[in-house]
Image: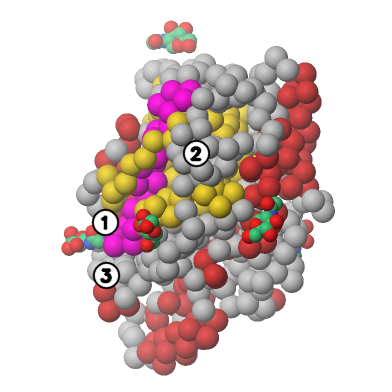
Amino acid sequence: MVMDHYRNRNIVLTWALLAAAVSAIGASYPTRPQDLTTPVQQRIAISAPHAVSIGWNTYQKLDRPCVNYGTTATNLTKQTCSSNSITYPTSRTYSNAVTLTDLSAATTYYYKIVSTNSTVDHFFSPRVAGDCSSFTMNTIIDLGVYGVDGYTIDMDETKRDIIPNIQPSLNHTTIGRLATTINDYEVILHPGDFAYADDWYLKPKNIFDGQNAYEAIIEQFYDQLAPIAARKPYMASPGNHEAACQELPHTTELCPEGQKNFTDFMNRFGATMPFAFSSTSSDETARVDANIAKQLSNPPFWYSFEYGMVHVTMLDTETDFPSAPDGPGGSAGLNGGPFGAPNQQLDFLAADLASVDRGVTPWVVVAGHRPWYSTGDTGSRCAPCQAAFEPLLYKYGVDIAVFGHVHNSQRFLPLYNGTVDPKGMSNPVAPMYIVSGGTGNIEGLSKVGSNYTGNVFAYAEDFSYGQLEFVDRERLKVRFLRSETGEVLDESLLVKDHTERFIRH
Ligand SMILES: *[C@@H]1O[C@H](CO)[C@@H](O)[C@H](O)[C@H]1NC(C)=O
Ligand SMILES: *[C@@H]1O[C@H](CO)[C@@H](O)[C@H](O)[C@H]1NC(C)=O
Ligand SMILES: *[C@@H]1O[C@H](CO)[C@@H](O)[C@H](O)[C@H]1NC(C)=O
Ligand SMILES: *[C@@H]1O[C@H](CO)[C@@H](O)[C@H](O)[C@H]1NC(C)=O
Ligand SMILES: *[C@@H]1O[C@H](CO)[C@@H](O)[C@H](O)[C@H]1NC(C)=O
Ligand SMILES: CC(=O)N[C@H]1CO[C@H](CO)[C@@H](O)[C@@H]1O
């Protein structure tokens, strides 16, 4: 979510004055481990059929990042290495990535990042496309750091929880819930707004140390997330808070090199997110379209993957389409990208969605950062995103679209071009939409605000997140959970016959 320009400036001025009176000034970096090969900020992702990528950071460059793995914890007989260890100006760490290939499907693997100070973790390898086992996917957007540089708050600033010394992972209600329910879901989608490092100036102690504060927040955040992201494929695409050192429009030239143009996001996820998969369809055209999509995909910005009954397409709602808000000259003034050729993202999306054989993957999910259906004022809805993407989502019969950016939970009936599908939740032609942006961050929750066509649920009382349970080929349960309690706030059932293999409306 974009904070108001003038409010930002006032906050900066206020904090600058306050900072003079604050004793502990400066960025709050995590302690650098003595052993510089110690893996930190671990994250895994589905990287291709039968392949999982392992990403992690270290406080020194690794000549040869390696991972040992196997199917029992005590016998890690296989090893894979790479030469992928990269950094950028202002970062203290190196992003390392290794891809484990030829994995048996749906199998527990144990892995140990090679280091003189690392431990064994494990993951469940991806289900093959067409595996019709039921499974659950969580949707986590707009997450944010907890602790000295974050809050667990309501937008009401008097309610900000500023307890600084608590173990973050124990107190971040959404990360905490993802930990206590770790066996209940298989994949997490996170289309954008991760650490909120660009909000460093909201803490007075950071005000004279912005460059370090930005990096310190990133380090803290990915450390806090590691217990989850090291265990479950954590699928990322960009949000506006990944764009630059702060959100003041038209000031990115003031950002230090390394803190603009989605640099950390690219370093961190560029080698771990997948290209689109080759199709396993028996249909020749589908296989050709999937190959076109693979060539046009551009991870970590836009790409797709298949997992069991589901084809998931991840979008970049920030750059790379007409009037993209964070693109050069875009409304957010963040001057990012472009990351592909003109029209590459939209050509990718068309080929990718056209390639889906519902006989193999009956369900199609699209996830991106900015919604075009949302309650609240006009600014909550991304009109250029709608113009660019909605016709394709409709044409190819996408089942559900997942967004965030607005900091609350919302569910919409299936709708197209602002009109609710008369079939409702039973075999609608149009996609169903959700907003899953209430997971917790320093900017707090967004008020639900005024109603909007098709909305049937909206919640902004506490932190919450979304959950998609793919029951079988015809049934998808969509839930919202309250992070602190695990209570189900809303549950709905989308029913789709999925009798047509290739949908065109
Ligand atoms: C080893 O790793 C642990 C946890 O990641 C860390 O707390 C500790 O400081 C590291 N030890 C050394 C010697 O770097
Ligand atoms: C370890 O795994 C290898 C092959 O994966 C196998 O040949 C070997 O017997 C295993 N060793 C033990 C102790 O289980
Ligand atoms: C951002 O990075 C991309 C890819 O490296 C590059 O093509 C683009 O020109 C950059 N944009 C700006 C505004 O520097
Ligand atoms: C979308 O709805 C508007 C009116 O709200 C209408 O003018 C326009 O033609 C519709 N577009 C399509 C593609 O149906
Ligand atoms: C919008 O109106 C619908 C229908 O009356 C209702 O179910 C929904 O809760 C409302 N949403 C909001 C945010 O007021
Ligand atoms: C939001 C939240 O869960 N805050 C809790 C963090 O931990 C402290 C100490 O355990 C609690 O008092 C807060 O309520």
User: Is residue 469 shown to the viewer in this render?
Assistant: yes
Q: In the image, residue 439 lies at what x, y percent?
A: 38, 55
Q: Name which residue type carries label 2.
A: Lys
Indicate which disc, 1 or 2, sits on the residue closer to the N terminus: 1
Ligand 6 within 8 Å, label 3 CB: yes
- What span is in magenta? 459-480
Ligand 6 within 8 Å, label 1 CB: yes
What colouring style does the render use? secondary structure
Q: Pick the quarter of the image with the C terminus.
A: top right
Q: Farthest residue to the front: give it.
A: 422
Q: Name which residue type carries label 3.
A: Asp
Q: Name which residue type carries label 1.
A: Asn
Q: State how many labels appear.
A: 3
Is residue 108 shown in magenta?
Answer: no
Q: Report whether 336 appears left or right of 226.
A: right
Using the image as rendered, state which of residue 449 and residue 158 is in the foreground.
449
Give the residue displayed 51% in from the left and 79% down from the top.
Answer: 4
SS assignment at label 3: loop
Q: In the image, residue 220 lies at what x, y percent?
A: 42, 58
Q: Report whether 78 appears left or right of 225.
A: right
Which residue does the numbered mark 2 point to in the structure image?
A: 423
Indicate which disc, 1 or 3, sits on the residue closer to the N terminus: 3
SS assignment at label 2: loop
Residue 171's tag is 1
Q: In the image, residue 149 lies at what x, y percent?
A: 38, 68
Quadrant of the image occupied by residue 73? top left
Q: Is residue 192 above or below residue 185?
A: below
Q: Disc 1 vs disc 3: Cβ atoms closer than 8 Å? A: no
Which residue does the numbered mark 3 point to in the structure image?
A: 161
